[in-house]
Amino acid sequence: MTSQNNMETLNRQIGQRIQMLRRVSGMTQAQLANGLITRNMLSLIENGNASPSLSTLTEIAARLNIPVGYFFAGSEEESAQFAKMRKIGEIRRLFLDGSFSECITVCASLRYPDDEILWITSECEASLAQRCLMRGALRSAGAHWEAAAQAAERCAYANGEIAATAAYWNMLIGAVSRTDIPAEAGRSESYPHARVEAEIFTYMRALALLDEGDVKTAAALRECGIIKQASRLDYLAACLAAASGNAEEAHEALCRVQESEETLFFTRFRATAALEKEAQAAGDYKSAYQYSTKRAALLEQFSR
């Protein structure tokens, strides 16, 4: 009797898993059974009222793109590994194609993600965060960095890179509208293993030094060759010119920053604020209003 009960339980398990996979695949019973068994027989199997032969079950598994062992998996975790096997090809393809949002969705459909899935999820979230940073959507960037860090924390492959990178960018995002530069923004030693370019740390260090009044060291950092991006060099030139009392040179450099398409969110916001302040000081209220409007638009963009 025990053996019979076990068989009935196994039949129900096999039937339920066939039905679930068939529906997920968008197949009708007739489509799955086509040329193999009758639709009525498949219905009996799915309802646990009939036992398929091993050859029939093997062919059903092939049509559902799942190893036949999935139907006999005894635990949720074990069956999850078979579910991963069914989807890993698609996950890897989406990841390599750069379809990160779609890849995350497929990974999230796996109830028990293993280290590989968690690593892929973390990398996808980090890539989406970088894309958001490039277009100035800072709120979304912060959310993606947070998700990347959470996935990495659960992954045995994590080496601290994602967590450190997420911490750095979220610190910098939070400082965008501040008038000063956080000193830690220029300290690479505070974020070991972070995927942050040396140019960014050097640039932020120069800006922090300007806040402290150390113009000489800031100028030396600008000329050291580490900072390559023209808009960053121009913004530093504007700050250095303003510090030396050369308002005209500072204005010209700020205008170059504004006009450059390569200027990223941090520099663009500060250049816009500087031009607004400059126009107010000169009594040019029309220009001040225009720059104020641009600054407000940037803040709205950052909130996306």
Image (tube, grey):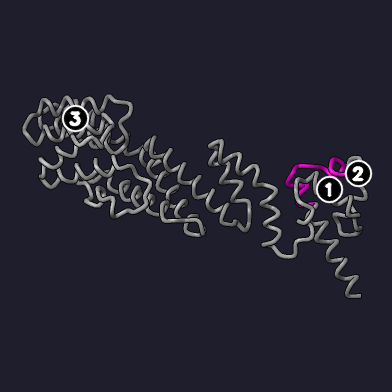
> What residue is rendered at 15% in x and 27% in y?
251
> Where is residue 200 shown, x and y percent of the image?
29, 41
> Where is residue 271 shown, x and y percent of the image?
22, 33
Please give the residue where the numbered disc 2 appears in the rendered image. Answer: 36
Closest to the camera, between mark 2 and mark 3, is 2
In the image, 282 versus 66, the foreground residue is: 66
Q: Quadrant of the C terminus?
A: top left
Q: What stretch is highlighted in magenta?
A: 19-33
Q: Residues within 10 Å of mark 3 (few under 14, many from 20)?
A: many
Q: What residue type is labelled 2?
A: Leu
Please give the residue where the numbered disc 1 appears in the rendered image. Answer: 60
Labels 2 and 1 touching (C-beta < 8 A): yes
Q: How crowded is mark 1: few (under 14 residues within 10 Å), some or many (20 or more)?
A: many
Q: Is mark 2 on a helix, strand or loop?
A: loop
In the image, 20 versus 284, the foreground residue is: 20
Closest to the camera, between mark 1 and mark 3, is 1
Please tell me whether the stretch drawn in magenta is mainly helix, strand or loop.
Answer: helix
Between disc 2 and disc 3, whose residue precedes? 2
- The residues bearing labels 2 and 3 have C-alpha atoms spaced at a distance of 76 Å
Q: What residue type is labelled 3?
A: Ala
> What residue is rendered at 23% in x and 30% in y?
291
Please give the residue where the numbered disc 3 appears in the rendered image. Answer: 288
